[in-house]
Amino acid sequence: MSFHTENEDHECKKERTQQQKDRSVALEDLTEYDVLCGRCTTCYNNVGNRRFRLTISMNVPVYRMARTKTQKGLVIASIMRSIKASGGRFFRPKNGRFIRL
C-alpha cells in the first residue's frame, strides 16, 4: 500500500487537469461527425448527434433480433466503430468546452 504526500496529490490533480485540457475542444472545433453526450439543446441539435440518431434508428431491427447480451453488445460495438471510422469522436460538455471521452 502506498501513500501520497499532499504535494504528490496536488501534482496528480494538476496532471489530470492538463490531460483534460489536452482532450477538450471548443464547439467550433467539432466536426460534422462528432457526437456530444448530454441533454442540452446544443447536444441534441448537433449534426453529429443527428447522424448518430439516424444510425441508431437504422440498427434498431438488428438490435431487436439479437437474442443475447453479447449479440446486442456486438450491434452497439458495430455502431460505435462506424461512427469512429467516419471520423466521429465522442465528447461530453464541461465548462463551455467539450471533453473527449
Image: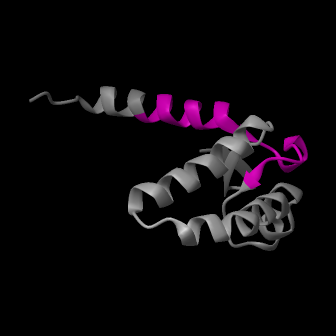
The N terminus: image quadrant: top left
Left or right? Give the position of 4 relative to 71.
left
Instruction: Give the percent coordinates (x, y) of residue 42.
Output: 82, 66
Residue at (57%, 55%) from the top-left corner?
A: 76
Q: Return the residue nearer the eye: 100 or 85.
A: 85
Q: Is residue 5 above or below residue 20?
A: above
Q: Quadrant of residue 60?
A: bottom right
Residue at (69%, 72%) from the top-left corner?
A: 39
Q: Return the residue nearer the eye: 89 or 70.
A: 70
Instruction: Give the percent coordinates (x, y) of residue 13.
Output: 43, 36
Q: Is residue 55 above or below residue 82?
A: below
Left or right? Give the position of 51 relative to 4.
right
Tell me if I can see residue 89 in this picture. no
Instruction: Give the percent coordinates (x, y) of residue 27.
Output: 85, 50
Q: Quadrant of residue 57?
A: bottom right
Instruction: Give the percent coordinates (x, y) of residue 3.
Output: 16, 30
Residue at (81%, 65%) from the top-left corner?
A: 54
Span shown in magenta: 13-35
Q: Is residue 78 above or below residue 9?
A: below
Tell me if I can see residue 51 in this picture. yes
Q: Say if the magenta span includes residue 14.
A: yes
Q: Return the residue nearer the eye: 17 or 45.
A: 45
What's the colour scheme? one colour
**Residue at the extreme left:** 1
Q: Say if the magenta span includes residue 41.
A: no
The C terminus: image quadrant: top right
Q: Is residue 64 above or below residue 73?
A: below
Left or right? Give the position of 7 relative to 67.
left
Q: Main secondary structure of the magenta part?
A: helix
